[in-house]
Amino acid sequence: MSAPTDAQRMEKIVSLCKRRGFIFQSSEIYGGLNGAWDYGPLGVELKRNLKNYWWRVMVHERDDVVGMDGAILTHPAVLKASGHVEGFSDPMVDCRLTGKRFRADQIPQQSGTIFRYEFAREAAPTDRALEALAHLAETDAEPKFNKTRIASSDALDLAKRIVERRKLSVSLPNADPEAIELFFSHLGDLLRQHPRSQWEEEFASAYSVPQRTICKDAFSVLVRPGESESKAKKTARAFYQKRGLKLPVVVFLPPADEVKKTQEFNPENGAELTSPRPFNLMFKTNVGATEDDSSVAYLRPETAQSIFVQFKNILEVSRKKLPFGIAQIGKAFRNEINPRNFTFRSREFEQMELEYFCRPEQGMELLEYWKEERLKFYENIGISRSKLYVLTVPNQERAFYSKGTYDIEYEFPFGRQELEGVAYRTDYDLSQHQKASGKSLEYFDEETKQKFIPHVVEPSAGVDRTVLALICEAYAEDEAPDEKGKMETRIVLRFHPRIAPIKCAVFPLLKNKEPLVAKAKEIVDLLRPHVYVFYDESGAIGRRYRRQDEIGTPFGVTVDFETLGEKDAALRDTVTLRERDSMKQDRIAIKDLPSILISRIR
Ligand code: ATP
């Protein structure tokens, strides 16, 4: 079987996530809310396991870190001081044809030929010209027209009658606005030459260029290599139609220029984009009953700020000495211009952040330390080191206050992308809040008797992005025998047991054998206080294994006739323990199951 391409792989992952209840689109039955996702029964387990493990290694297993859980609704003064109100924006561009919004820095560089259009004019007859056409098309033998209700789509039918009846030498046009314009202009000239009433002159002057609508907006289109020139005209026509022209005759402004590496056109349709404008990514809301400037609050765009704002309180109550950290896991909200790549870029997501406060001279060393710690973390949840990259963020791309930033990236099927940022933020955040609040956020060093604002190193990870990386890393297709021993494709999520949603499945070999079922249920009760188990008695045992493989359950316990001691008394109260990846089965005493599973899962 050939390996699926990355796009196919991603498609399979997204469909598995929905099929097995990891991740659903939010508000799906109403058409979905873009950029928001709901985690189903398995997704929530996976997410919790990840957060719990992060909390365990970042807080519980250390003496120098304490936790907090701050509010999501944030006072505007906090985000003014942090720079978010002024500066938390992305440059945004809109497609001038469809209105679709993109982040300017994410537009791919494109090459091709630019066709510029100066303006467009209407080729459909004006209301007055239509009325004249109706008069000219009317005969005593045919019913009279209601002149006020003639649609422009009737114009060609009326014109055809006139041409046929008067035997005019003008050929009928195709659907192109240019051909239609030429036809009506010519018809006007011919009618004007042989007037039978005032309507011939009336039509010719009502159809003259100055009487027709003109849209003066200029517009350009990029035609990429391999695409035809007529595509530019079609796109331009659609642009002027959106601006109200029914049959736009587009006016080309030569020359057509060759360009390389432009980011000024919509990569999906070649239409021109607007120039970039800053777009603040924060969700604004009002607190209380009044909706004015005095009641504005924001949904936090990161969890970090409440840590800085509570620094003094936490320092006092925890009685920690530098260096020490404050950790938080929680929701953050950003009105991303282009949510995409499944959950990778969402508008509502969770962060796991640590602010590790230190003396200024420790900053650079701790930056290295935390980068290494965080890499170890990802390896410990089953993400292979070979799929992780450390990007040293170059000086010009770093926040001005940061003395060093690393991005930890993962090789997703859709490309290498950031999982976590590890940044040395100096004393910027605490200094800003001290200045803005007028409250001291200094640390008093009892040994040196010095007072100073601590510096901070911040490892900031995304829960949802890591969950997605875990699923992408775990997804595999291999071969396993079916009921009759024939090899078939098996979908398996090779989660590290530590983060797998369900740790162990328990199966009675047959569901209609009461002693097997009773024993299996006893085992469930034995394991439940220690690990999350799942009992399944329906279907052939092979099918039951396969269902668990597909959701990444690392262990399967089967109760068979040996367990009941029917074949060999020495095997009484033993079960088979199947391992998901190797599919190997070992016979284990039931009483040993809890300790064996705990030691392999922790
Ligand atoms: P990006 O450049 O991808 O927008 P960022 O550098 O702005 O990310 P940070 O502000 O450093 O991100 O946030 C820390 C972490 O929070 C990121 O590494 C990521 O894991 C997570 N995160 C940020 N924005 C989003 C989002 N829109 N959806 C999901 N996770 C996000």
Image (cartoon, helix red, strand yellow):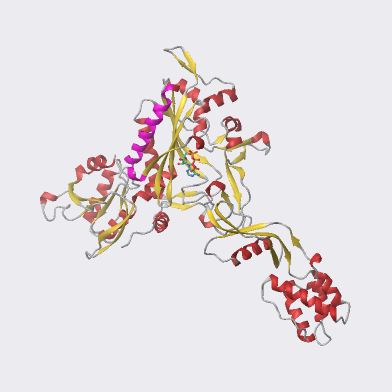
Residue nearest the viewer, comparing 128 with 55 = 128
- Quadrant placement of the C terminus: top left
Q: What stretch is highlighted in magenta?
A: 361-387
Queried whether the magenta region covers residue 513, the answer comes back as no
Residue 245 x/y as whole percent: 71, 64
User: Would residue 537 be seen by someone viewing this image from the given angle?
Assistant: no
Q: Which residue is most to the bottom?
A: 141
Residue 12 figure quarter? bottom left
Residue nearest the viewer, comparing 9 with 64 = 9
Task: Tell me: 387 left or right of 300.
Answer: left
Residue 318 x/y as whole percent: 43, 22
Residue 598 figure quarter? top left
Residue 182 x/y as whole percent: 73, 73
- Residue pictured at 10% horizontal, 53% vertical: 568
Residue 129 figure quarter? bottom right
Residue 39 x/y as whole percent: 44, 49
Queried whether the magenta region covers residue 369, the answer comes back as yes
User: Would residue 347 be seen by someone viewing this image from the given angle?
Assistant: yes
- Quadrant placement of the N terminus: bottom left
Q: Main secondary structure of the magenta part?
A: helix
Residue nearest the viewer, comparing 290 with 418 = 418
- Residue pictured at 86% horizontal, 75% vertical: 201
